Image (cartoon, helix red, strand yellow):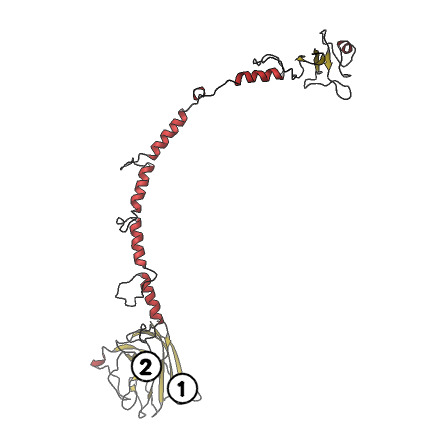
Amino acid sequence: MSDVKTRGDLLYTDKSKVIGKSQLYALLVDASRDPVLDASGNEQVVDLEVVEGRLQVGSSVVDGGNATLGAKADAAVTDPATAATIVAILKGILSKTGDTEITADSINLNTDGLETLLGDLKTLIGAVAESPTQYTLSERLKVLATALGEVQASPTANTLLDRLKTLATLLGAVDAAAVIDPTASGSEIALLKGIIKQLQGDGTAGKAAPVSITGSLTNPSASITIGTGAAHSAGDVVSTDAGAILEFETGLPAGSGLIILGSYTTLGQNAVFSGGAGYELKLFDASPTVQATNAAYDLADADVSKAKGKIIISPLAAKTSNCEVTDVGHNKPFKLAAGSTKIYAKAVCLGAETTVTAKVITFNLEIISA
């Protein structure tokens, strides 16, 4: 034990101090033989004693030194103020816990806060009753259940489930048959299928009647071959000697509404009529009273209910082979008579013109269904 210093050695060591006890001590040194210091700068010194003929570190520790492990036989120490070895302290801990029984009575918990919290929660939830206290969770759930209604074949009227059932009935089943009669009852799915069936129909046996889509343009035309040429006065009819009526086949369903957007007029010669100033087309929804060419236009009593206004045709312009004029912006609404698909008209001179026998005037209308 070359690192063990006796009291006599300590007296002559410049890095030591006298312990002041007639006993063997050991000064702890490092590999360079310098004293090991504690956190306060004190040299670490332990006492030595003889146990069963052997020299070992003693059970006591010099004040300021580290605690020692001690001996197996060290008595238990339970007082935290008493100096003791580690073995003695551990035995003291065991003596205090070895026979300890932890019971509910030995646990002292403060449950006042928990009881208050549980009480508030109970109040918030409310009692499960026919009429729970207002504004409690139970009362709100009861109100919600009433608004939802019962899950049954006939839920209470005006509940959410009742409204959903009504909506489902109105929508109908996905396999509902098409309904094409607008006067018949049918779910929305059945009516939508009816619309599709109508659009796909072509009028043949076993299929729905065809549907006319509004907004389509047509260009019906009508012509007159002028009778005996003559000098017309303003307001005279231009027609055949027999008084032919202009008939425009619209191609639209009978009784349909339409708009005359514009017109295109031609004359079958390369020079305009002398004095020509254009025409009025007097419009009718049924064939009016016949008037021969060069007769003064008259609205007969029988034609009053048929008359539907007029459009103005501008004076024609001569070209190399024929005469023509285009008019836009008529925008004249017109409704076909029930059972009729035609527009009827008379051409009336706007000025005094001299016509030529057997020449053909053709009026083309640009119409759109409304």
> Label 1 amino acid?
Cys
Given residues 29 and 85, the one toward you in this image is 85
Q: Secondary structure at mark 2?
A: strand
Q: Position of residue 1 (x, y in %)?
A: 76, 16
Q: Position of residue 320 (x, y in %)?
A: 44, 88
Given residues 58 and 356, the one toward you in this image is 58
Given residues 75 and 247, the one toward you in this image is 75
Q: Position of residue 223 (x, y in %)?
A: 34, 86
Report crowding for label 2: few under 14, some 14 to 19, many 20 or more residues within 10 A (C-alpha). some
Compared to residue 279, the image places residue 59 above or below, namely above
Q: Which mark is residue 248?
A: 2
> Label 2 amino acid?
Phe
Compared to residue 328, the image places residue 80 above or below, namely above
Q: Position of residue 310 (x, y in %)?
A: 30, 78
In the displayed structure, does residue 303 sit left or right of residue 221? left
Is label 1 in contact with label 2 (beta carbons under 8 Å)? no
Question: Would you say residue 363 is visible in this rendering?
Answer: yes
Q: Residue furthest left?
A: 301
Q: Nearer the viewer, mark 1 or mark 2?
A: 2
In the displayed structure, does residue 63 sit left or right of residue 285? right
Seen at 30% across and 83% down, the residue is 247
Question: Would you say residue 276 is visible in this rendering?
Answer: no
Which residue is the site of mark 1?
A: 323
Given residues 212 and 319, the one toward you in this image is 212
Seen at 32% across and 40% down, the residue is 140
